[in-house]
Image (cartoon, helix red, strand yellow):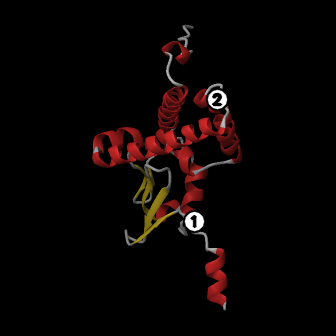
Amino acid sequence: MLLIPLAINLSMLHLPSWLEIIVRVLAVYFFMILAIRLFGKKELAQLSVTDLVFILLISNAVQNAMVGSDSSLSGGLIAALSLFAANYTLKKILYKNEALNTLLQGEATVLIYKGSIQKEHCRKADINLHELEAAVREHGVQSIDQVNLGMLEADGNISIISNDFTQATTHTFHKKHKLKGKLLKN
């Protein structure tokens, strides 16, 4: 098996420390986008305990890759600001470039059509029958044969349209604001 060495020594470039942090952050940021895109959109919306642990460990593993030996407050702030700037810029680019947006974000996938499971699409999306049935029930539909259209959205959520294409739901959670709830009771 051929292993390609990924070790890149940025110190050989003799960059100022703040610029080296920015380069490191951008490299990790784009690597993470690529990795998430390659491992599937299902992972985005359906986090299990193992997924959460995985995310925490990944964040810890890439921290040093982003800031190098600079563990100062300014190094952390530069890294955070670089992430915000990169994310903001990428969002603007994706908004203006539909082809790039589709490449990075993916497209919605039909999982159920007129009560029939699209097995090949489910297989490609790595969604099994139990997960599909659970998603249907979460949308208040009793069985798959009552679903007109079930879509795995680009963001990883599953949308369900039932009742002859008249009732559409996307599984989302809305938290009631604590203060607002108390004010309404009084």
Q: Quadrant of the N terminus?
A: top right
What residue is rendered at 64% in x and 35% in y? Answer: 58
Q: Is residue 131 left or right of residue 163?
A: right
Q: CA distance from mark 2 to mark 1?
A: 39 Å
Does 91 appear above or below 141?
Answer: above
The residue carrying mark 2 is: 70
Q: Give the x, y percent position of residue 175.
A: 61, 69
Asked which secondary structure carries label 1, the reply is loop
Along the line of sight, the residue nearer the viewer: 182 or 49: 182
Q: Give the x, y percent position of residue 5.
A: 55, 11
Does 171 appear above or below 24?
Answer: below
Q: Is residue 50 left or right of residue 109?
A: right
Residue 106 visible to the viewer = no
Q: Quadrant of the C terminus?
A: bottom right
Identify residue type, mark 1: Phe
What residue is rendered at 39% in x and 47% in y? Answer: 91
Identify residue type, mark 2: Asp
Q: Give the x, y percent position of residue 52.
A: 67, 45
Asked which secondary structure carries label 2, the reply is loop
Along the line of sight, the residue nearer the viewer: 51 or 126: 51
